[in-house]
């Protein structure tokens, strides 16, 4: 609850705006305030045979209506920025939280963004509804009380006392409803997660003859959801006692109090009719609304904000500088000393005691079977993993291109400028030429052509080219490509490597094709149990597994 | 299903209907009773009796409303619970033909199952709105029909205002939704690019980019507010205007002596009731989701096949069992998603043999699932030691299958291994883990066998070995491996399968893997062919001790 309310507070500025909403809500209720008094006087006037006076009193209601309608317009104008700012704030906080998690883990995470955005909108609607309900709850409650006191303070007291008791009772009930509602929401969530898990494993459970266990577990989950829901239901029965206390008892007490007063002539019949009008038409609906709003929408809002606070509060990555504290010695782009890495203390280490020095302008190819640790090495060099032993020194301006080709919805220009915001159009056109993107540029309608989300006009190879061009345009002097050319035709990768090294850049390629080894200055070979570093020709001479790798590749090529 | 939903909790349904009707009647009676009491009060008569009557009606109204809330809520919770139980029984039924996607089915069980219960409340409130409207309007007409004419004119004006709003706001609403969808799309895009965002440290600029459409959303939101404001003040005029009309017309009638002051108060009360009841019409929109939920839920139940036929067998085989398939075929998902039957298979494997199943995957997999009891035969029979597998008690745990992915349920590692079993000692668990070559991995975990599953991070190969240990504990007489070692490297795979084959003194072992190397460990190979029934070449095994000692294969 605290996290949710903190999130709300951090995104909604200015209590003054709230005050303005409350003020216009009050003015808006002018007709309601005037109605009881006016009806009372109008009836008295009619009974006394003074139709012109009655018309005047009814006219007062009409004037109040016009004022009230004007206030309604101003009220909406006041609510609009308040609610829209709240939505913007929540949306920004939750999108940031989602991306913060992506940046920290490097993995997409749960695809619940759509749901989160939907929840932000639910909060927007609930907050509008609650603010809007000032008009049907707080304001009429206040105006009915004022109106009744103006009409006759004895009748007013007859209403106020039970009403105050009702409000006190409701304020005791709401926190309990919030607790039970949250409990029910958690039970539902747990049931949903459990159901998905058990059903996913159902074939395996059948194989074990343990499907009855799965069924029992799901049934137990459904039972605890029902139990939690029933506890919520029980609070609704108590709500009705608030309505009885706040709306029904005042009606009776007005009539009871007025009996002796009418007899001794200190109260007019009109005043009694006016008072019952207030109670029946203003107070009773207001009490019902108040109970419904505070026990329903407000509770829902609190529970929803809780969930959003979880998303918004996700931590981002630690700063990169903290992870790569020192730079390599002069003339080198990357230096690895005694590098060791394991994903968990108890798991088999991926790397142990790796030493590697990469000179500036050098082209290094990393080869080996899948799952041997090539990508891990790239991530360590890029500073995305923390080594369990040894040190990594890498150039500050290092651009790591991971396997997945990230092209986003936006113009082609935005995509290319992603890592080089200052590059000019000539440079962009050169990049299109170098990376074989001229055709795509034409198809999209130039640099300002719009790329849509999951645009089917772009092939997977096009995406790789865009990502490579982006890295080429970036100011980095060390580029690490993790299978970034895997979908391009043979021959293209050679030209691309040349484009990168031509400017004197250092290039590290995690290779999917072995022929890159022949073009590289240095080869790092993962044979599954150890890592070997050397020139291509030397490894061919001295290492059987490396030779096998190349002859296999030759076999597949033909 | 829809027509019978209420039968799931008939008492609560009837209570809800009864109490709702009583509560509505009581609140309808209130304005008239107030009027009568007022007349008595203002004319100086004895108001005691009318006040008592009013009080009684108010008490009834309160109690009935409270009771309605309680019984409607209980009805909804109970009906949902029962619908879920029914759907759970369907999807977990052994005879179920298909296993639908887990996530989708979970949504149906969680969200859709909660919908049908809402139908009762919606139907009641629509009926009550209609009834209140009719009774309220008739009561007004009975007192003073001129007031009715005024009120109806007001209603027509209100409907026009609302319709105008719906038409005007549609474009802004669409722009609002479209902007939101663009943000969601961009955010999903960015999530897919998580590795790049991490690599480049660009998450803050990315967030800014994802949120670019927010300006458009904001603009659309502001214009929606303007339109809403316009509708609100127009319809906001309606309630007091209707009241004004009622009082003006009623007042004239009062002045002419056609009605009493009490009747005027009653008129005002009824007018408020009629206007207030209009809010309930919105509930009708909920019927659409009820319909969708009911349909989606009934789709799960529709996957049940014929009622299962189980006759419990008095005896449970002990030790290694003989496996027999008589023209047995299994259900499988056909190309069009409709269930189809696999070709019938005959098979006979003697107790304590280790056999590999060779042939098309569809067929070897069907045999594996049939022989282990994971699938119920669509036709033919599956017997262990001559007893139909289906007739064994559900907790007999004679046969078990280890697949490519184990069941990852339970609280701890030990709980996972003994899922659904009772009274399994730690020693037996350890022995099974040893046989599957996973015991050292488990021992290395922070809390060993008691490590919570939530803290478990194992490779695919380690998980498969857990799955084999799991199946060893669940199948006392027969173990079937179906692609159960696919993620292991060849050396470990041979080691594990050899160790499992080493338990052939206790159980029969069937292996469907498609890896030729494993056939070398087995005593016999069974060729499955789609056309002709399966042929069995039962080759006499070599001396078992010899096999185990040398760890070598035929």
Image: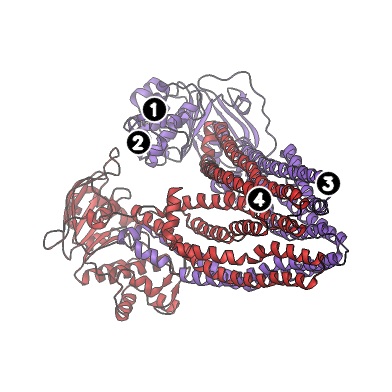
Q: Which residue is mark 4?
A: A159
For the residues labelled 2 and 3, the Cα–Cα distance comes to 99 Å
What type of secondary structure mainly makes up the magenta span? helix
Q: From the viewer's perspective, is A94 left or right of A382? A: right
Judged from this view, the residue extending furthest toward the left is A330
Q: Earlier in the sequence, mark 2 or mark 3?
A: 3
Residue at image point 78% right, 58% down: B265
Judge depth for marks 2 and 3 and give the one in front.
3
Q: Which chain is red?
A: A
Res A106 quadrant in image: bottom left
Which residue is denoted by mark 2 in the rendering? Answer: B492
Q: What mark, if any, has residue B435 been given in the picture?
A: 1
For the residues marked 3 and 4, what is the alpha-carbon distance in whole angstroms? Answer: 23 Å
Which residues make up the magenta segment?
Answer: B433-437
Residues tagged by mark 3 and mark 1 found on one chain of the structure: yes
**Residue B256 on image: x %, y %:** 87, 67
In the rendered view, would you say B476 is above or below A296? above
Numbered label attached to residue B46 = 3
| Chain letter for mark 1 | B
Distance (Cα) linking label 1 and label 2: 12 Å
Contact check, label 4 and label 1, Cβ < 8 Å:
no
Q: Is residue A390 above or below residue A118?
A: above
Are discs 1 and 2 located on one and the same chain? yes
Image quarter hosting the C terminus of chain A: bottom left
Marks 2,4: beta carbons within 8 A: no
The mark lying in front, picked from 3 and 1, is: 3
The shade of chain B is purple
Mark 1 touching mark 2, by CB under 8 A?
no
Q: Earlier in the sequence, mark 1 or mark 2?
A: 1
Mark 2 neighbour density, 10 Å: few (under 14) some (14–19) many (20 or more) = some
């Amino acid at each position: 609850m605290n996290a949710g309310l903190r999130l709300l507070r951090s995104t909604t500025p200015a209590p003054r705006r709230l005050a303005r909403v409350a003020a216009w809500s009050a003015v808006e209720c002018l007709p309601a305030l005037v109605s009881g008094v006016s009806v009372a006087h109008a009836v008295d006037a009619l009974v006394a045979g003074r139709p012109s006076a009655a018309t005047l009193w009814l006219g007062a209601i009409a004037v109040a209506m016009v004022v009230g309608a004007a206030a309604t317009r101003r009220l909406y104008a006041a609510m609009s920025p308040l609610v829209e700012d709240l939505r913007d704030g929540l949306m920004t906080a939750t999108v940031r939280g989602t991306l913060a998690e992506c940046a920290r883990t490097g993995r997409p995470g749960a695809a619940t963004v759509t749901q989160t955005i939907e929840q932000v909108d639910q909060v927007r609607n609930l907050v509008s509804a609650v603010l809007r309900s000032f008009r049907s709850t707080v304001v009429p409650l206040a105006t009915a009380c004022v109106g009744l006191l103006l009409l006759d303070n004895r009748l007013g007291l007859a209403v106020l006392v039970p009403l105050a008791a009702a409000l006190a009772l409701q304020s005791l009930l709401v926190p309990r409803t919030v607790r039970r509602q949250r409990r029910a929401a958690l039970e539902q969530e747990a049931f949903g997660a459990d159901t998905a898990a058990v059903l996913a494993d159902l074939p395996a459970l059948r194989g074990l003859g343990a499907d009855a266990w799965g069924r029992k577990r799901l049934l137990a989950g459904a039972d605890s959801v029902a139990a939690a829901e029933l506890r919520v239901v029980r609070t609704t029965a108590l709500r009705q006692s608030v309505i009885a206390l706040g709306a029904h008892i005042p009606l009776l007490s007005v009539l009871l109090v007025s009996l002796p007063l009418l007899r001794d002539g200190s109260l007019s019949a009109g005043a009694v009719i006016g008072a019952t009008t207030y109670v029946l038409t203003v107070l009773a609906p207001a009490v019902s609304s108040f109970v419904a709003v505070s026990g329903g929408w407000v509770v829902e809002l609190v529970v929803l904000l809780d969930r959003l606070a979880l998303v918004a509060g996700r931590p981002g990555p630690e700063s990169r500088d903290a992870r790569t504290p020192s730079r390599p010695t002069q003339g080198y782009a990357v230096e690895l000393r005694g590098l060791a890495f394991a994903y968990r203390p108890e798991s088999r280490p991926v790397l142990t005691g790796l030493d590697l020095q990469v000179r500036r302008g050098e082209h290094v190819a990393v080869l080996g079977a899948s799952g041997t640790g090539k990508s891990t090495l790239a991530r360590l060099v890029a500073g995305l993993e923390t080594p369990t032993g040894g040190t990594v020194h890498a150039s500050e301006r290092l651009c790591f291109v991971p396997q997945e080709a990230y092209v986003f919805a936006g113009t082609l220009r935005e995509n290319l400028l992603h890592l080089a915001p200052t590059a000019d159009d000539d440079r962009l056109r050169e990049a299109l030429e170098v990376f074989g993107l001229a055709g795509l540029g034409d198809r999209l309608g130039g640099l300002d052509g719009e790329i849509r989300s999951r645009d089917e006009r772009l092939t997977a190879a096009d995406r790789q080219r865009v990502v490579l061009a982006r890295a080429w345009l970036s100011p980095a002097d060390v580029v690490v490509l993790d299978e970034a050319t895997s979908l391009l035709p043979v021959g293209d990768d050679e030209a691309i490597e040349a484009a990168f090294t031509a400017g004197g850049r250092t290039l590290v390629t995690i290779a999917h094709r072995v022929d890159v080894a022949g073009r590289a200055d240095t080869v790092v070979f993962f044979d599954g149990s150890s890592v070997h570093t050397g020139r291509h020709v030397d490894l061919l001479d001295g290492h059987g597994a490396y030779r096998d790798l190349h002859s296999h590749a030759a076999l597949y090529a033909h | 299903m829809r027509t019978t939903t209420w039968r799931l909790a008939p008492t609560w349904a009837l209570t809800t209907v009864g109490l709702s009707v009583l509560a509505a009647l009581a609140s309808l009676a209130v304005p008239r009773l107030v009027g009568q009491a007022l007349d008595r009060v203002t004319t100086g008569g004895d108001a005691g009796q009318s006040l008592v009557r009013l009080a009684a009606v108010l008490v009834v109204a309160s109690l009935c409303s409270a009771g309605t809330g309680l019984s409607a809520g209980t009805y909804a919770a109970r009906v949902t619970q029962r619908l879920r139980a029914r759907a759970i029984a369907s999807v977990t039924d052994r005879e179920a033909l298909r296993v639908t996607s887990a996530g989708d089915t979970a949504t149906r069980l969680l969200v859709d199952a909660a919908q049908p219960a809402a139908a009762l409340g919606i139907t009641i409130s629509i009926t009550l709105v209609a009834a209140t409207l009719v009774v309220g309007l008739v009561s007004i007409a009975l007192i003073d029909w001129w007031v009715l004419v005024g009120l109806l004119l007001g209603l027509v004006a209100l409907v026009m205002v609302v319709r105008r709003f719906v038409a005007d706001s549609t474009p802004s609403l669409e722009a609002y939704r479209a902007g939101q969808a663009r943000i969601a799309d961009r955010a999903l895009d960015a999530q897919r690019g998580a590795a790049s965002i991490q690599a480049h440290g660009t998450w803050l600029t990315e967030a800014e980019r994802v949120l670019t459409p927010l300006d458009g959303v904001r603009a659309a939101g502001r214009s929606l507010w303007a339109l809403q404001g316009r509708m609100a003040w127009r319809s906001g005029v309606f309630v007091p205007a209707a009241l004004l009309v009622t009082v003006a017309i009623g007042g004239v009638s009062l002045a002419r002596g056609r009605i009493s002051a009490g009747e005027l108060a009653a008129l005002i009360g009824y007018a408020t009731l009629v206007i207030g009841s209009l809010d309930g019409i919105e509930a009708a929109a909920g019927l659409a989701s009820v319909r969708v939920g009911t349909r989606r839920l009934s789709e799960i139940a529709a996957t049940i096949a014929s009622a299962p036929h189980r006759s419990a067998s008095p005896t449970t085989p002990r030790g290694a069992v003989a496996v027999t398939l008589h023209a047995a075929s299994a259900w499988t998902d056909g190309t069009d998603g409709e269930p189809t039957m696999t070709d019938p298979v005959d098979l006979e494997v003697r107790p304590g043999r280790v056999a590999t199943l060779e042939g098309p995957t569809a067929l070897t997999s069907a045999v594996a699932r049939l022989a282990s009891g994971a699938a119920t035969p669509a036709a033919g029979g599956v017997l262990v030691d001559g007893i139909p597998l289906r007739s064994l008690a559900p907790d007999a745990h004679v046969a078990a299958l280890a697949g490519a992915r184990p069941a990852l349920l339970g609280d701890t590692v030990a709980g996972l291994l003994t899922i659904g079993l009772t009274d399994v000692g730690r020693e037996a668990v350890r022995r099974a883990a040893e046989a599957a070559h996973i015991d050292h991995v488990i021992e290395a975990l922070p809390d060993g066998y008691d490590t919570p599953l939530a803290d478990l991070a194992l490779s695919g190969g380690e998980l498969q070995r857990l799955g084999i240990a799991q199946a060893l504990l669940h199948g006392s007489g027969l173990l079937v491996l179906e692609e159960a070692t696919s993620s292991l490297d060849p050396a470990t795979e041979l080691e594990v399968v050899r160790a499992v084959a080493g338990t052939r003194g206790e159980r029969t072992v069937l292996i469907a893997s498609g890896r030729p190397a494993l056939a070398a460990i087995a005593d016999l190979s069974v060729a499955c062919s789609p056309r002709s029934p399966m042929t069995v070449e039962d080759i006499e095994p070599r001396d078992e001790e010899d096999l185990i000692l040398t760890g070598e294969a035929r």
